[in-house]
Image: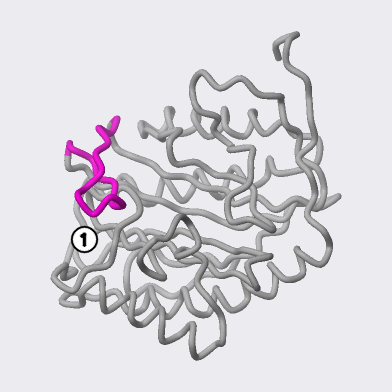
Amino acid sequence: MSLFRKTKPVAANTIETNQQIAALVVVQNQIFARLLDGLEAGVSTADVAALADELALEHAVHSSLPLMNGFPAGISISVNQEITNGVPRSDKLLKDGDVVKLAFGLHHLQRAFSMQNWTVQIGAGTAIAGDLLGPARAILQESISMCRPGTLVSEIGKHLQQTCSKTGLFISELFAGHFIGEQVHMLPQVLPRSGMFEPEHILSAGCMLHLVVLAHPAKPSVKQLKDQWTVTDRNCYPSACYSHMVLITDDVPKVLTATYPLKKGSPISSR
């Protein structure tokens, strides 16, 4: 660590905020499982968004995505070369072989937030997807063990980058994990952007981490579509995004979000 950088603990959420987040995630897990189950060939991405709205109403909860700078839907659904912020469309039909990235989160009175990303493949697989989804999810799972009090946030970011590199994958600092609590996106990011000068942050018990792995099979060339939201890869490679809500405790990290299959039709595994 540079002599010019000082260590600073990540501020813990209040006990009440973490309790509200935990309650949100219980409902989020139920809705997320239903949304993933609804991903089938012939279904439009707008149909999936409509299901999310219906389930949110049924559970008397509210999506957090529209609070993120006015995102126009309750879910983000990005297909194949779309990297993130995929806006649901009635004319975009899912088909066999598609790699689908789903993002969904909830909020409680805009004072507590939850979020999760997951990627599945529909129907028949391809070699590039088979080499991408499993390793990306494994990198996320393996990195959870580092989420303990006293760990430098930058070390987690460095570990993610090194592990992805060893696997032959690429991750982008533009879309990285972050802390979450009374706001949907709280600093510091797990992967600080190049050239940013900031203190070294240390994990502390009581903070909540939205740990994210967004992996690409090759270095992406990023482009934003005309809808001003959807971010895509000009090289047309698919990507995979997985995330968990991780509560930092005095002991082992506590994963609140559920773990789902990588292909449609597999049984949901335990956390």
- Based on the displayed image, in which of its 4 quarters is residue 45 positioned? bottom left
- Quarter of the view holding residue 107: bottom right
Give the SS element for disc 1: loop
Q: Residue at x 79, y 44 (%)?
A: 11
- Give the x, y percent position of residue 211: 57, 48
Mark 1 is surrounded, within 10 Å at the Cα level, by few (under 14), some (14 to 19) or many (20 or more) other residues, namely: many
Q: Considering the image in quadrants, where does the N terminus appear?
A: top right
**Which of the 4 quarters of the picture holds residue 52?**
bottom left
Residue furthest bottom in the image:
58
**Residue 195 screen position, x and y as percent:** 51, 18
Q: Residue at x 35, y 51 (%)?
A: 84
Quick check: is 183 in the magenta stretch? no
Q: Which residue is mark 1?
A: 98
Give the image location of residue 21, x and y in percent: 68, 67
Percent across and percent down for residue 207 are 75, 50
Vertical comparison of 17 with 165: above or below? below
Q: Is residue 202 above or below residue 119?
A: above
On the rendered structure, is 41 left or right of 20?
left
Tell me the magenta residue range.
Answer: 219-235
Task: Depth check: give the residue in front, 121 or 34.
Answer: 34
**Horizontal side of residue 65 vs 145, given as left or right:** left
**In what quadrant of the picture does the C terminus appear?**
bottom right
Q: Is residue 14 left or right of residue 81?
A: right
